[in-house]
Amino acid sequence: MEKVRSASKNWNQALTDVGLHHDREAFAALYQYFAPRVKTYLLRFGLTEAQAEELAQEALLQVWRKAEQYHAEKAAASTWIFCIARNLFIDQQRSGRGKLEKSTDSYHEHESLLDHQEYASDDNSDWKSSQKHIEDALKELPLMQAQLVYKSYYQGKSHSEIAADLEIPIGSVKSGLRLAFKKLRLSLASDGLTGGEPV
Amino acid sequence: MKSAQIAPPYELMNDAHVAPKHHPDDATLLSYAAGSLSPGAQMLLQCHLACCEHCRHRVADAEAIGGDLLEHLPQSSMRASVDDIFAKLDLLDTAPSLTSKAVHFERPDWLPEWAEPVAQWLEKDQNWQRLAPGISQIKFDQPNFSGDKAVRLLKISPGTCMPRHGHSGSELTLILSGSYCDETGRLCSGDVADLDPDINHQPIADRDQDCICLIVTDAPLKFDGWIPKLMQPFFGL
């Protein structure tokens, strides 16, 4: 538990240092860790390799430029960076720079929402044990609920798009997401992460 | 609100600063945080969030889940090294700043301050298109909303009874001004009705003023009875 907190706090501290002191070393660490993951996030939304690379770079540029607006007591660094990447993706789609064919693959084709072997290659060994709570909470979700979370967060699908994909009623999509949210929120609560203001 | 608090007088309940009592479904808040709502639904949520602290906290939680999920993603190799990024930053830092000022759109007086995101889609002196006695609309069919089935403002005259209808998809309604009652209760400025397809309802506008709402649908409304069916083409749904 202490390890979980400390690893997460390291990123929060790094981002705070970038904001306060334009700390290049802290930014380099954030870049090494988050840029490759932001790129994967964007690839799952259906962007091409080149688009994902460009947008991931833009996201990290924004992290540097907006870091002064970051407050560790309001949100975790990962949450803040997630919001930047998400907003960039939405803006890019709205600006009409290429409508995307949203992918139709499903949760079980990826085996898991989480990827485990990646941690072996991380420099920061703290991460192996970090984020235990959300990981456990996701594993405990029934397959259908995990599927709904996957399609919402990783494929950008609306309720009606998910309903069409899975051939289930919209009402079932909503009730499944409601239940999943409730369980995942509990795992956040035990991490002391809830109640923050949006970025 | 704590139970110990004494209910505010009725006049205050009508005040726009009173926190909304009808909220979007948790599933809708989660999808907003995940960035997966349609453009019209996203705009509707932005307005509601601007006036609803309760939902802002919910969304922050859903965003924290997004942050956790981001950390768990496998890595894709970046072609740009961090030094490339610093080189870009140094270039940008010396270039003249291009930061654009936030644009403020002219807001008609029936549009509350928190509903600013809607203002940019309204033309100056935009006309309401009459649909039926006591009901008129402004339809947003800009390319921005091509991912929505329909995004519209509906103005309902005091006391007007809307046709009873169900939905084949989902319907999000945000009250901008005035109020209405239906089977789910009384909805006032800032409230959101987030209806599942199985809910069949008949809104009636309250008698004191026009009720203006933003409605986002992702599938056609289904009206009961033959007269409403005749109306359906007028709604263009």
Image (cartoon, rainbow, N blue to C red):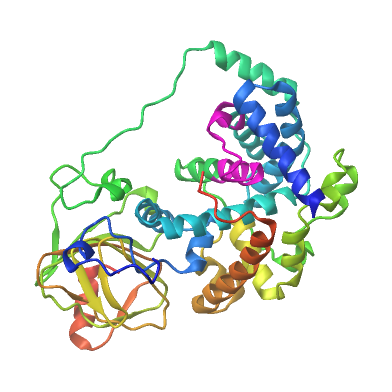
User: Which residue is found at the position 57% from the left and 53% from the top?
Assistant: B63
B232 and A147: which one is in front?
Answer: A147
User: Which residue is found at the position 71% from the left and 74% from the top?
Assistant: A143
Residue B173 lies, with reference to residue B232, above or below; the image says: above
Residue A39 lies, with reference to residue B225, above or below; the image says: above
Q: Is residue B147 visible?
A: no
Q: Is residue B161 visible?
A: yes
Task: Decide if residue A4 is on the left or right side of residue B50.
Answer: right
Residue A22 spot, x, y in % from top left: 64, 21
Residue B96 spot, x, y in % from top left: 47, 12
| Quarter of the figure with the N terminus of chain A | bottom right
Q: Is residue B190 magenta?
A: no
The image quadrant of residue B225 is: bottom left
User: Which residue is found at the position 57% from the left and 79% from the top?
Assistant: A168
**How many numbered marks have been drawn onto this rendered protein structure?**
0
Q: Is residue A67 magenta?
A: yes
B121 and B116: which one is in front?
Answer: B116
Residue B175 spot, x, y in % from top left: 27, 63
Residue B136 lies, with reference to residue B232, above or below; the image says: above
The image quadrant of residue A95 is: top left
Q: Which residues are magenta?
A: A63-86
B42 and B168: which one is in front?
Answer: B42
Toward the right, the furthest residue is A120
User: Which residue is found at the position 63% from the left and 50% from the top?
Assistant: A46
Residue A165 spot, x, y in % from top left: 59, 70
Task: Decide if residue B172 is on the left or right side of residue A1.
Answer: left
Magenta span: predominant SS is helix
Task: Decide if residue A3 is on the left or right side of residue A19.
Answer: right
Task: Decide if residue A136 is on the left or right side of residue B110.
Answer: right
Toward the front, the furthest residue is B4
